[in-house]
Image: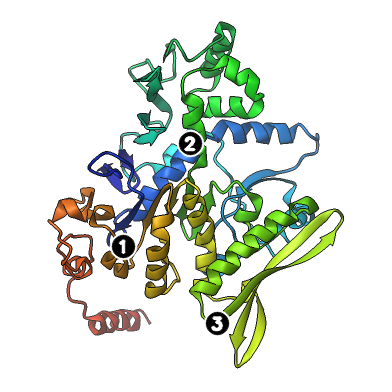
């Protein structure tokens, strides 16, 4: 559930079946500007909120390396398309003294790899401010329901008008029953004023197994909560301390929830860029090119074989997909190539020279791979640059392999002919701009003999563009007359 989140005043979406089991896949349709990308962005918001204190600490630690440490930025690689087609999903990078370290970065990522250096938000109010509905006087609220290991849970955050976190709660299984693991609130009534009253913390008796550790965390909460979430604090604790210590200090299933959220694979649009995060394997996150330790060569060959099998089945003119490698200074540099039949001859094409559609499929490959391995994936505009019939055939072949949950936005109407109606969602907008997201099976009764593509295009389910008559000649003529008068 989202409140005052970007283009949504209030929206809910249920990605479960009638038996309340997670749908294996869900594809979301809607007219341009309806909020499809904003929905996927809300999952990126969750992942970023989990890491604000971690990245803040990395910045502080990096500054302590040297008294002359210069400007510091945190960036992460992105899934690119069009002019950004050199960017790959998932790998997070910390850069210090960027200009002086580009050679080192090239050694890690590959000489041809390009990067985006947008600063990663190190405080939660920054994220909330960017996500808040334009012109809204209220803060945003987000609530994420999930099913993990057969148990339901809910994680929610609420932000005040000043974009500070004022309420956070996690409910999940404790000793076979669904209970509140924690609930933290800003106890003052006026969230615009300076905090002068204590933070109200309510913890499950099973959360802190050691009293002294619980007191330490409560001190951290007093210092950081509001600018950082409790989940971010605990996420950093698990990163900073060894597993044995954390297992002795924290109980309940909070560790499982944190691991689950961190495992989400999310690709979404920010302005003209498409960011990806959640691919933790370095090779899988950088399939086009990169540099790895020599002992990772066998792993590279496994992915090479997978890519070869995938693309030689997708394209009739692709005869082989392989890596060219070069060992140097204890590392192995690699770059992807396609052997294609062109003009009666097999020719080797370096990946950067491939078509937008091929690059698009390569960008999606890690997400498909991770979902087939059981991860939850959220992907914005899955069909960008890819032929309608091609993505349709790929989805037909792959949707049965998903062991996790695959959620994507799309404009590709040909998919409507092959997808389960329960897994086809449409964003509907009423005349007041209020929105709802529903599966088409709940909007209109569907039967096997129905052509849901035609029904969608004919406006049966909503979510299609409605325009008035456009007299473009009159528009241009009026503009020319206005320009002529100004001369």
Considering only vertical position in the picture, is 193 above or below 127?
A: above
Residue designated by label 1:
32
Q: Position of residue 36 (x, y in %)?
A: 34, 54
Residue at the image point whose x is 37% and y is 15% from the top: 187
Disc number placed over residue 260 in the picture, else none: 2
Lower position in the chain sequence, tag 1 or tag 2: 1
Between the residue at mark 3 and the residue at mark 1, the CA separation in whole angstroms equals 34 Å
Colour basis: rainbow
Q: Position of residue 79 (x, y in %)?
A: 54, 58
Answer left or right for 2 relative to 174: left
Quarter of the image with the C terminus in it: bottom left
Quarter of the image with the N terminus in it: top left
Check if mark 1's residue and mark 2's residue have beta carbons within 8 Å: no
Frontmost residue, 5 versus 215: 215
The part of the image, by quadrant, that contains residue 349 is bottom right
Check if mark 3's residue and mark 2's residue have beta carbons within 8 Å: no
Q: Position of residue 120 (x, y in %)?
A: 57, 43
Q: Residues within 10 Å of mark 3 (few under 14, many from 20)?
A: some
Residue at the image point whose x is 45% and y is 38% from the top: 46
The part of the image, by quadrant, that contains residue 200 is top left
Residue at the image point whose x is 55% and y is 34% from the top: 52
Between the residue at mark 3 and the residue at mark 2, the CA separation in whole angstroms equals 40 Å
Disc number placed over residue 317 in the picture, else none: 3
- Secondary structure of residue under mark 3: loop
Q: Position of residue 387 (x, y in %)?
A: 41, 74
């Amino acid at each position: 559930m989202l409140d005052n989140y970007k283009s949504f005043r209030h929206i809910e979406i249920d990605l479960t079946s009638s038996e309340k089991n997670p749908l294996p896949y869900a594809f979301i349709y809607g007219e341009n500007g309806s909020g499809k990308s904003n929905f996927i962005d809300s999952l990126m918001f969750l992942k970023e909120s989990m890491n604000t204190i971690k990245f803040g600490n990395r910045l502080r630690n990096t500054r302590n390396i040297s008294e002359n440490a210069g400007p510091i930025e945190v960036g992460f690689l992105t899934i690119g398309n069009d002019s950004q087609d050199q960017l790959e999903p998932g790998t997070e990078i910390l850069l210090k003294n960027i200009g002086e370290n580009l050679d080192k970065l090239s050694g890690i990522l590959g000489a041809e790899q390009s990067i985006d250096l947008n600063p990663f938000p190190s405080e939660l109010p920054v994220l909330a401010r960017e996500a808040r509905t334009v012109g809204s006087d209220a803060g945003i609220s987000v609530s994420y329901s999930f099913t993990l290991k057969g148990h339901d849970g809910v994680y929610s955050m609420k932000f005040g008008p000043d974009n500070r976190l004022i309420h956070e709660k996690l409910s999940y299984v404790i000793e076979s029953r669904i209970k509140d693991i924690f609930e933290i609130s800003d106890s003052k009534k006026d969230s615009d004023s300076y905090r002068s009253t204590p933070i109200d913390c309510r913890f499950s008796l099973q959360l802190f197994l050691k009293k002294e550790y619980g007191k330490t965390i409560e001190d951290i909460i007093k210092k950081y909560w509001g600018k950082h979430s409790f989940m971010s604090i605990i996420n950093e604790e698990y990163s900073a301390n060894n597993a044995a210590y954390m297992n002795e200090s924290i109980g309940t299933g909070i560790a499982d929830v944190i691991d689950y959220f961190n495992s989400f694979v999310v690709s979404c649009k920010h302005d003209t860029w498409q960011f990806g995060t959640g691919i933790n394997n370095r090779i899988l996150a950088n399939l086009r090119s990169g540099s790895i330790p020599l002992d990772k060569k066998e792993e590279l060959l496994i992915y090479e074989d997978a890519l070869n099998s995938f693309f030689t089945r997708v394209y009739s003119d692709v005869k082989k997909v392989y890596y060219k490698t070069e060992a140097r200074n204890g590392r192995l540099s690699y770059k992807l190539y396609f052997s294609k039949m062109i003009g009666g001859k097999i020719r080797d094409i370096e990946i950067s020279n491939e078509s937008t559609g091929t690059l698009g499929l390569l960008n999606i490959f890690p997400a498909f791979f991770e979902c087939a391995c059981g991860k939850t994936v959220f992907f914005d505009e899955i069909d960008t640059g890819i032929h309608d019939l091609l993505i349709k055939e790929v989805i037909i072949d792959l949707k049965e392999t998903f062991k996790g949950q695959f959620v994507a936005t799309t404009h590709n109407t040909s998919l409507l002919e092959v997808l389960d109606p329960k897994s086809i969602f449409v964003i509907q907008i009423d005349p007041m701009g209020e929105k709802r997201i529903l599966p088409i099976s709940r909007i209109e009764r569907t039967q096997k003999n129905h052509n849901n593509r035609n029904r969608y295009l004919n406006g049966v389910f909503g979510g299609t563009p409605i325009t008035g008559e456009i007299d473009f000649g009159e528009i241009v003529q009026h503009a020319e007359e206005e320009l002529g008068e100004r001369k």
